[in-house]
Image (cartoon, helix red, strand yellow):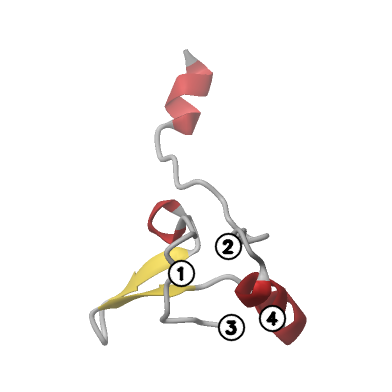
């Protein structure tokens, strides 16, 4: 489920699922959430997203060293 809203408590800016859409010039969440997942995300007090994955493009390089 794509979501164009960003919660202040979330880490969307650093998430692998938060991708730029060139057609409309905005960022969208590309995580595959169903309605229950999305409801729990919106109603959680801490804004924790169960689909958050840190977008760390240098993780592979650090692992090789």
Question: On the rendered structure, is 49 left or right of 59?
Answer: right
Disc nearer the start of the sequence (3/4): 3
Secondary structure under tag 2 reads loop
In the rendering, at what x and y percent does residue 49 appear? 62, 61
* Circles 3, 1 touching at the beta carbon (< 8 Å): no
Q: Which residue is mark 3?
A: 1
Q: Is residue 57 visible?
A: yes
Instruction: Please tell me how crowded label 2 is: few (under 14), some (14-19), or many (20+) other residues with Cα within 10 Å.
Output: some
- Residue lying farthest to the front in this orientation: 45
Q: Which residue is mark 1?
A: 7
Disc nearer the start of the sequence (3/2): 3
Disc nearer the start of the sequence (2/4): 4
Give the quarter of the image for residue 36: bottom right
Secondary structure under tag 3 reads loop
Whole-number angstrom distance, CA of label 2 to CA of label 4: 11 Å
Give the quarter of the image for residue 19: bottom left
Q: Locate the N terminus by quadrant.
A: bottom right
Whole-number angstrom distance, CA of label 3 to CA of label 2: 17 Å
Q: Which residue is mark 4?
A: 39
Label drawn at residue 47: 2
Q: Nearer the viewer, mark 3 or mark 1?
A: 1
């Amino acid at each position: 489920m794509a979501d164009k809203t960003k919660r202040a408590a979330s880490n969307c800016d650093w998430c692998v699922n938060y991708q730029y859409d060139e057609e409309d010039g905005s960022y969208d969440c590309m995580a595959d959430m169903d309605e229950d997942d999305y409801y729990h995300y919106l109603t959680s007090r801490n804004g924790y997203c169960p689909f958050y994955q840190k977008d760390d493009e240098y993780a592979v390089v650090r692992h090789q060293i």
